[in-house]
Amino acid sequence: MKKKTIVTEGFEEEKIEKNENHLNKDIRWERLDNTAHLFPVIAGESMTNTYRISVTLNELIQPELLQQALDMVLPKFDGFNLRLRGGVFWYYFEENGKPAPTVKKEAKFPCRFIRQNKNRSYLFRVTYYKYRINLEVFHVLTDGMGGVNFLKELTYQYLRLAHPALIEQVGDSLASGTSLNREDSFLKNYKKSSARGYKTKKAYLVKGEKLKPGEFGVMHGYMNVPELKKVCRAYGVSINEYLVGCYVWSVYTECLHGMPSKRPIRVAVPVNLRPHFNSITTKNFFVMISAEFHPVRETYTFEEVLQIIRESLRSQMSKEHLEKLFSYNVSNEKMLFARAVPLFLKNIAMGIVYTQSALANTTTITNIGNLTVEEAYEPYIEQFHAFLAMSRGQSLKGTICSYQDTLVFTFSYVLKDPSIQRGFFRRIAEDGVAVEIESNGVNYE
């Protein structure tokens, strides 16, 4: 059992903390969702499982007001007011209740590992830089949609503090569209299954010289949404299919140089399950599908690659298939034998399974979607950005989000050679879409 030291009248006394079976009744606790069980097992300094969502305002951030806004908003979100605990059989969440993490000016590379003991036991951090508010979240808490949900409310509260006249327009409470739901939608919607849905065969992996230890590359490409839609209509694909196809094409041409490969280029694409299962949960609720292109002959055109990606993605988007993907995992979790296995043995097993699945994908490209804000706040908000930390075998990832008429495709990476990024944006520009590029400069020496 863990010991806690209390200082009383200058003397130290030891108090034994109650173990998890005798938790104080006033302390709220909850189980992790099915996907979240994996993240504490694999997370560390080199694979942080942290993602960032940020909002850029039209005015400089006032740090004291941002801290005040976080102090006000955090107690309203049970899903962020948590710390992670390790039990005998499972990890679990426990209500934190400490003061909110300290808002800091960004001075280091993003998506670093979040150490609870240096962050008041919280699993997220808030930083700022000039006009930008950054929210970084350990994926065990929630997925991208849960992060957006929290960031928007934090931004609204900040803007109300900076511009009190807004309160007369919108009031001073949470927006009507903000969810506080903590349902485990995996458990609610799964069906007993014994069929594995995920692929485990190895994919082509992008390798090369890496940036200096601790460095983290970020490159944004800004595109006009109407221009993109026009191009996508001409190809008969969605924006998501087109951008994934452009990425695959860039790997095919820049890395494989248009030659056949023993292993497929396979892109993991997270799918938000909420609209498919009528859920508003703020817990994780997504699955991964795969866009696959296996070059087995000498020459493919871009149009051919794009249609292969289109068919690959669409064949997996049925509700039945998505249900199958997460039902297998939930069914395993609910097996009596698995529930009785001690946590340290579960960790070993999950680590092995993760390694197999991680090497089965060349990269991950996630689409946060088209973000909207309450009308009263629109004049103050310029843009949203999002990107992912690295994971095993994946040294380059992509994230898509859009706001109003601007879509941002963001590369996050630890590779020195930016050939894939250049090939990706070049391919889009060749289709007549203007691209404006911005980076944090790690590739410039």
Image: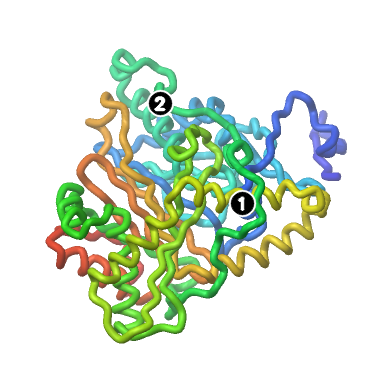
Q: x%, y% of residue 7? A: 79, 34
Q: Amino acid at mark 1?
A: Arg
The foreground one among 25 and 305 is: 305
Q: In the image, 422: left or right of 94?
A: left
Q: x%, y% of residue 20? A: 81, 38
The numbered mark, 1 or 2, whose residue comes first in the sequence reads 1
Q: Is residue 48 visible?
A: yes
Residue found at x 29% / y 65%: 307
Q: x%, y% of residue 320? A: 50, 47
Q: Amino acid at mark 2?
A: Gly
Question: Which corner quadrant of the image does residue 216 belong to?
Answer: bottom left
Q: Which residue is mark 2?
A: 177
Q: Which residue is mark 1?
A: 115
In the rendered view of the protein, which quadrant contains the C terminus? Answer: bottom left
Can you say whether 1 is above or below 223 in the image?
A: above
Q: In the image, 178: left or right of 379?
A: right
The foreground one among 203 and 178 is: 203
Q: Nearer the viewer, mark 1 or mark 2?
A: 2
Under tag 1, what secondary structure? loop
Can you say whether 307 is above or below 229 in the image?
A: below
